[in-house]
Image (cartoon, rainbow, N blue to C red):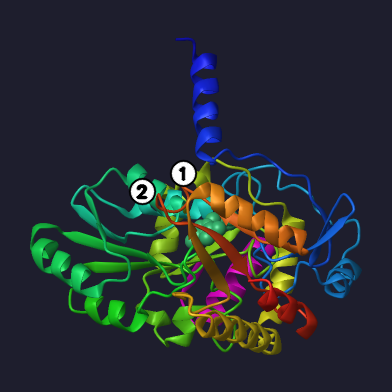
Amino acid sequence: MHIYQLMQQELDLLQAQGNLRALNRMQHEGRYIASGQEKLLNLASNDYLGIAADIALRQEFLDTLDVRHFVPSASASRLMTGNFPVFEELEHELAGLYHREAALLFDCGYHANTGILPAIARRDTLILADKLVHASLIDGIKLAGVPYYRYRHNDMQHLEKLLQQHAGAYDNLIIVTESLFSMDGDEAPLARLVSLKERYPHVLLYLDEAHAFGVRGARGLGCAEEADCIPSIDFLVGTLGKAAASAGAFVVCNRLSRDFLINKVRPFIYTTALPPVVVAWSLFVIRRLGGMADRRRRLAFLSEKVHQALISRGRKDLSTSHIIPLLVGESDRTVTQAGEMRRRGIHALPVRPPTVPEGSARIRISLRADLTDEEINHLIDNL
Ligand SMILES: *Cc1c(COP(=O)(O)O)cnc(C)c1O
């Protein structure tokens, strides 16, 4: 069959399963999305602190720029001529915040995860990853081309068993997990992970804080800050496109690792560096993150309110964060229910396979700190 015919067949199949994806055009107005006549509250973005919707903050940043400092392109990889001073300023800032030796920026979290894991995995490495890690981590593990096991989600007994079974047979092991899981909104038991890891000198811990950076911890550094275990995380990845309302990603690690990654990570070497103006905005935001504890408290308060409402209605609520999945099951029904919420002015997206396991389609609500009391009550009335 011709490849175009095969493509059509696969699209038809996705359509029949209710899993066909398409792009929707979005007009953003702060925390609202305008779509035709409708104005929908945006509970599907990752702008958890409302920074992306904060016009005053954006204006403040623009006021720091003049045409010389507005550099829209790095015009090269950082290893060529793209290493503008602002990159190292941001890395220095991040390393300082985490009290670690070094930080390294990437164009995005997908690049970080698909680049770092293949670089650091050696021929005698075993990777142990949580069953529910993000697609970018799965792709990184596959690209690494080394043996791996997926342990049951957040199941430390399973992980410990795998460690006992295999630690002797490999020179190096890497445990890979998210801190706050993007689809379930629950958290990895960091203290237990760290204590497990520390029993084995040849086990490294790789932690993806994409949904926790900015949001958790007293200074917004993530779950590892909250659990007071930053020094025990060998590779701590944060992304800048979510709560930090910018673009890019970083890893904090030791100096040796940074030097190594600069030489070995293909999505670092073979890609144009981020636009310097974007990095300047990231730096601008990150310098203010520590002072945004009021936004973090508001988000925690709103999350607690929604969790309580769900529990009081007898719903099973697995989330412990601002990411709240409403499990439905079948894709079709999930899409219908998301449409129902939409009619009530709430934009929350159905998440379907293959993003989540078969039969666990859900509506995923991402709360945001800039919701008013009225808006959160409206949401609770329409859950
Ligand atoms: C969003 C996300 C990424 C990818 O980050 P981008 O900067 O958007 O490429 C990586 N890991 C997790 C857990 C994520 O949720």
Counting every numbered tag in the picture gives 2
Q: In which quarter of the image is the N terminus?
A: top left
Ligand 1 falls in quadrant = bottom right
Left/right placement of residue 237 relative to residue 157 reads right
Are the residues at dot 1 and dot 2 in contact (C-beta closer than 8 Å)?
yes
Q: Which three-letter amino acid code belongs to the residue tagged 2? A: Pro
The relative height of residue 124 versus residue 75 in the rendered view (above or below) is: below
Mark 1: few/some/many CA within 10 Å (<14, 14-19, 20+): some
Residue plotted at (63% across, 43% down) = 272
Q: Which of 18 and 209 is in front in this view?
A: 18
Residue under label 1: 266
| Image vertical order of residue 307 relative to residue 148, above or below | below
- Identify which amino acid the numbered label 1 is placed on: Arg
Identify which residue is drawn at 9% across, 58% down: 169
Where is residue 55? Give x, y as percent. 87, 70
The label number, if any, that marks residue 28 in the structure image = none
Label 1 and label 2: CA atoms lie apart by 9 Å
Visible in this render: residue 370? no
Q: What residue is rendered at 83% in x and 66% in y?
A: 30
Give the residue drawn at x 45%, y 73%.
186
Check residue 118 in the rendering and tell me which mark sits there, or answer none.
2
Q: Where is residue 98 in the image (x, y as percent from the top left)?
A: 51, 80
Residue 263 drawn in magenta = no
Give the magenta range. Answer: 85-103
Q: Quadrant of the C terminus?
A: bottom right
Image quadrant in which you'd find residue 324: bottom right
Foreground mark, 1 or 2, reads 2
